[in-house]
Amino acid sequence: MSSMRRAKGPSPISIETNAMRIPCPYCGDRDFAEFVYRGDATVKRPDQSLSESAELATDYVYLRDNPAGPLEELWYHAQGCRNWLVVCRDTRTHTIASALLARDYSS
Ligand SMILES: [Zn+2]
């Protein structure tokens, strides 16, 4: 019997058991890894006819709030129905209050 036994340790593959699940209106509850995150769903493209539109455009592209609490976000179900969703997620707990198709969303 060899004295060169392998020590038993944790598996090199880690499985996240409480990963965030997103309730897709089309597909049902799905793992968040099936989705692509696209950020805040509430920002609006500025009116290009305004004199300060260049500054507003810069803010639109680069500046985002980072609230601690509920936030409406865009998620794309890339490995599912390929719909855009607006998901209301608490950024502190990852609790999802609602998810609806983006085409049905009105802010
Ligand atoms: Zn879906």
Image (tube, rainbow, N blue to C red):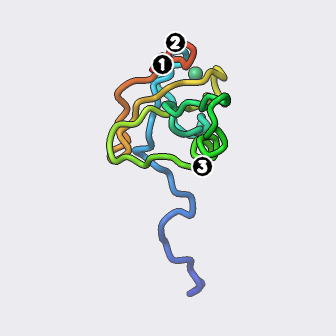
Separation of disc 1 and disc 2 at Cα?
7 Å
Separation of disc 3 and disc 2 at Cα?
26 Å
Which quadrant of the figure contains the N terminus? Answer: bottom right
Image quadrant of ligand 1? top right
> Mark 3 or 2 closer to N-term?
3
**94 vs 87: above or below:** below
SS label for mark 3 = helix
Q: Which of marks 3 and 2 is in front?
A: 3
Q: Which residue is drawn at 63% across and 36% down?
A: 51
Q: Which residue is drawn at 44% across and 32% down?
A: 72
Q: Which residue is label 1 attached to?
A: 100
Report which quarter residue 49 is drawn in: top right
**99 vs 41: above or below:** above
Q: Which residue is label 3 attached to?
A: 62
The mark found on residue 104 in the picture is: 2
State left or right for residue 63 relative to residue 93.
right
How far across and how far down the image is residue 88, in percent?
A: 40, 30
